[in-house]
Amino acid sequence: MHAVVGLAEEAVPPCPVRRVTSGAGRVSYLVSGYAEARQALADPRLSKDTAAFFADKGSKRRLHPAIAQSMLATDPPQHARLRGLVTKEFTAGAVARLDGFIARTVEALLDQWPAAGRVDAVAGLAVPLPVAVICELLGVPEPERADVRGWSADLFADGRPDRIDAASHDLAGYMTDLIAWKRRRPGEALLDRLIAARDGEDRLTEDELVSLACLLLVAGHETTANFLGTALLTLLQHPEERARLRASTGELPSVLDELLRHDSPVSTATFRYAEQPLTLGGTDIPAGAPVQVAIGAANRDPARYPEPASFQLDRDAAGHLAFGHGIHRCLGAPLAKAEAGIALGAVLTRFPGLRLAVPPEELTWRRTRLVRGLESLPLLTG
């Protein structure tokens, strides 16, 4: 059995739902069991309407409304209306049309890796690939993509509310300007189509348009960037499995779910709270209580996945919660898996001698509560 750096061997505590108190005395409920997490993610009694929850809390935060009140923070019917505008852009068929662009981008990035030398796979592949893909899909000009990535990273800066708030205004301000620019120069990108929905059919308010564009930009690459880094690390730590996949890269699509389950790029699902009292996993949760769903722990629940800390190529990992569950399940899941499959296949093929340049315990991880990802992944290519 192989442990993952940064994760406990058995990540799931004995109690699948427990009451927890923060250092500031705030009470919430932590869900870590698989069955309970799956139920919580789809339970209509758990609301995601953060605006309603914090309305009377006197928060000192200054998140831009486009970030604070995104589609992720809405309930039906508003959520269904917003999601319906973009769902068709992320179907398997729609994503397949991007395969050529993804493959060309991967090859261009790997062309910059030395044949025999040191490279950071996070900076050299895991981050720039999904940034390029989602920016291409939305129509973000190439010279501005580095700024977009910086603001997105700052949105997940754990323990730095000032930095998060500032990034939210920077990103929303940029997107407002980009939308104005595109109105003067309409094109064929996804953002242009959303503008048409706003201006033509009036299905979006201006605030909703900016918010949806920001959400797609951030969510469209953040999870994938983390997943690519952790998946590559997992394969490097399992040489026999990596050799098998290199000999048969056609197996990769079926292994992606196990890679996602084994080391989920999302640690904790976004905010939820109980609109009414409910019982979950034998624990009573009062109305108004925040509920945290620990995705990473649920994906390692031994009641659902035997020997959960082990990486098994032939495991049926279908049903993992790395992309969530229910009406809020990540609509970009097909795109994330397409990018990962193409990128990992190319790395395995082109760099058979790839190995870690530092001991695993020296790897640095991002300091953020919501997502799990590497700050860098130094590798030797030959």
Image (cartoon, helix red, strand yellow):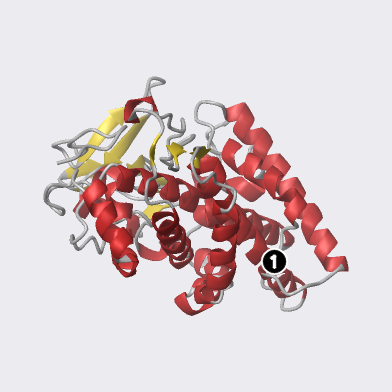
Task: Please tell me which residue lies in front, 135 or 61.
Answer: 135
Q: Residue at x 44, y 50 (%)?
A: 228
Residue 270 can be seen in this image: no
| Residue 244 spot, x, y in % from top left | 25, 59
**Vertical arrangement, residue 330 with respect to residue 234, above or below:** below
Tell me the residue at 53%/49% (across/down): 125
Q: Nearer the viewer, residue 347 or 343?
A: 347
- The location of residue 122, given as percent across then percent down, is 50, 42
Which picture quadrant has residue 355?
top left
Residue 66 in picture, x, y percent from top left: 65, 50
Q: Nearer the viewer, residue 91 or 381?
A: 381
- Quadrant holding the N terminus: top left
Query: Which residue is at 47% across, 53% downward?
Result: 224
Could you tell whether 282 is left or right of 202 in the image?
A: left
Q: Secondary structure at mark 1?
A: helix
Residue at 43% of width from left, 32% of height from top?
365
Query: In which quadrant is the C terminus drawn?
Result: top left
Considering only vertical position in the picture, is 10 above or below 301?
above
Residue at label 1? Answer: 191
